[in-house]
């Protein structure tokens, strides 16, 4: 599939030009579009993420304060080390609402930013967030397999939780290397490992099954979300299954990046016990009425995640990297005379 409902035009190299950063998001897809999306992961991505754009930050507890700045910068440092100086120009692929790049910019990793996403709704929200934060950011609707920027444009390309949505990851990596300047770096974080996805999905499904059954008991009826909302969540989960295309074995992801032409490639992983807790917690939160879980619950979930992440940072020295839930990969475009 190559067409998306984003009103893009292509130039002679097949790159997307004249993108439509202000194309209307599509929160109300037609029945026919939704049906077609089940066979078309890119269309599914546009519909699903346009529909989610305005509520995405709230749903995933995304903020642009110290908590998320520390998280984003921490992921960057873990993958790529501490840069000697800020990158002049950075691009984010599959930016969503801008969580990764905007927080990296606030944390001093990059000075000027560009955001791209297949979903016009997401680009719109990311640009709004950047403006509210006073950051120097432009945005274009675009496909990671045909990045809408010229060759050698960026010092840094980043992405968070995006690689697993892209049908042809190697083609996207080739595009990343095309738009990077020689010697430029890429960092992708937040994608699921094959083993991690196996246990996370099972834990999530078991929590959903248990919570929705237990809250049918009359004594717990106030903990049950209205059936219509539960049905909507199930439909969203079905579409989510269409947009989630890959899980990664870290060594295979490294091979993919090298096959695309990257040098100095390295994948690392993180979150094991934190994921074992995090998936049931997030699924439980989605299965009960929001007002039932107040500030105390949010603090419990966040502090537990912090403690378990600390534990995981030690377990990383002992357990195989394939066991952890999140994979991060970094590498470079060869400098003009860089040895392989
Ligand atoms: C799970 S969301 C992550 C958003 C954001 N990076 C974050 O971490 O909050 C994945 C994003 O990738 C976008 N996406 C999916 N496939 C894409 C593609 N082929 N090219 C560009 N963006 C894509 C989706 O529209 C969505 O906004």
Image: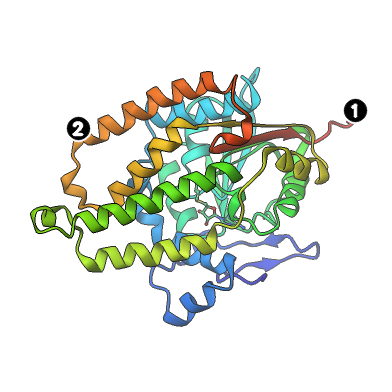
Q: Nearer the viewer, residue 256 or 93?
A: 256
Q: Name above or below for residue 237 compared with residue 5.
A: above
Q: Residue at x 90, y 27 (%)?
A: 339
Q: Nearer the viewer, residue 85 or 72?
A: 72
Queried on whether the Cβ of the residue with tag 2 lies below 8 angstroms from ligand 1, the answer reads no
In this figure, which residue is indicated by the disc labeled 1? 339
Q: Name above or below for residue 38 compared with residue 83.
A: below
Image x and y of residue 116, in percent: 58, 51
Q: Nearer the viewer, residue 84 or 31?
A: 31
**Contact (Cβ within 8 Å) of mark 1 with mark 2:** no
Q: Residue at x 18, y 39 (%)?
A: 294
The alpha-carbon separation of the residues under discs 1 and 2 comes to: 53 Å
Image x and y of residue 249, in percent: 67, 42
In this figure, which residue is indicated by the disc labeled 2? 296
Q: Secondary structure at mark 1?
A: loop
Dot 1: few (<14), some (14–19), or many (≥20) neighbours within 10 Å? few
**In the orientation shown, which residue stands out farthest toward the left?**
219
Q: Is residue 3 left or right of residue 59?
A: right
Q: Is residue 269 left or right of residue 59?
A: right
Image x and y of residue 188, in percent: 62, 39
Q: Name above or below for residue 229 compared with residue 289.
A: below
């Amino acid at each position: 599939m190559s067409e998306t409902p984003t009103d893009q035009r292509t130039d002679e190299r097949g790159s997307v030009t004249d993108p439509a950063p202000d194309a209307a998001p599509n929160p109300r897809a037609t029945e026919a579009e939704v049906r077609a999306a089940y066979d078309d992961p890119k269309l599914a991505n546009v519909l699903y993420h346009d529909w989610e754009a305005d509520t995405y930050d709230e749903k995933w507890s995304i903020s642009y304060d110290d908590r998320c700045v520390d998280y984003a910068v921490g992921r960057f440092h873990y993958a790529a080390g501490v840069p000697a100086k800020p990158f002049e120009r950075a691009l984010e692929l599959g930016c969503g609402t801008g969580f990764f790049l905007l927080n990296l910019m606030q944390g001093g990793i990059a000075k000027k930013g560009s955001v791209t996403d297949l979903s016009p709704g997401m680009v719109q929200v990311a640009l709004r967030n950047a403006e509210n934060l006073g950051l120097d950011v432009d945005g274009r609707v675009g496909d990671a397999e045909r990045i809408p920027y010229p060759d050698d444009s960026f010092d840094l390309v980043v992405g968070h939780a995006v690689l697993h949505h892209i049908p042809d990851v190697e083609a996207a990596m080739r595009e990343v290397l095309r738009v990077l300047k020689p010697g430029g770096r890429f960092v992708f974080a937040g994608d699921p490992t094959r083993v991690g996805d196996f246990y996370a999905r099972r834990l999530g499904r078991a929590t959903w099954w248990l919570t929705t059954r237990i809250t049918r008991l009359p004594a717990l009826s106030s903990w049950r979300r209205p059936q219509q909302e539960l049905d909507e969540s199930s439909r969203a989960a079905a579409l989510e299954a269409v947009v989630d295309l890959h899980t990664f074995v870290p060594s295979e992801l490294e091979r993919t990046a090298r096959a695309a032409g990257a040098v100095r490639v390295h994948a690392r992983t993180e979150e094991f016990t934190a994921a074992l807790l995090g998936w049931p917690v997030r699924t439980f939160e989605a299965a009960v009425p929001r007002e039932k879980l107040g500030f105390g619950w949010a603090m419990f979930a966040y502090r537990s995640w912090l403690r378990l992440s600390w534990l995981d940072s030690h377990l990383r020295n002992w357990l195989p990297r394939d066991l952890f839930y999140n994979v991060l990969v970094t590498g470079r475009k060869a400098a003009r005379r860089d040895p392989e």
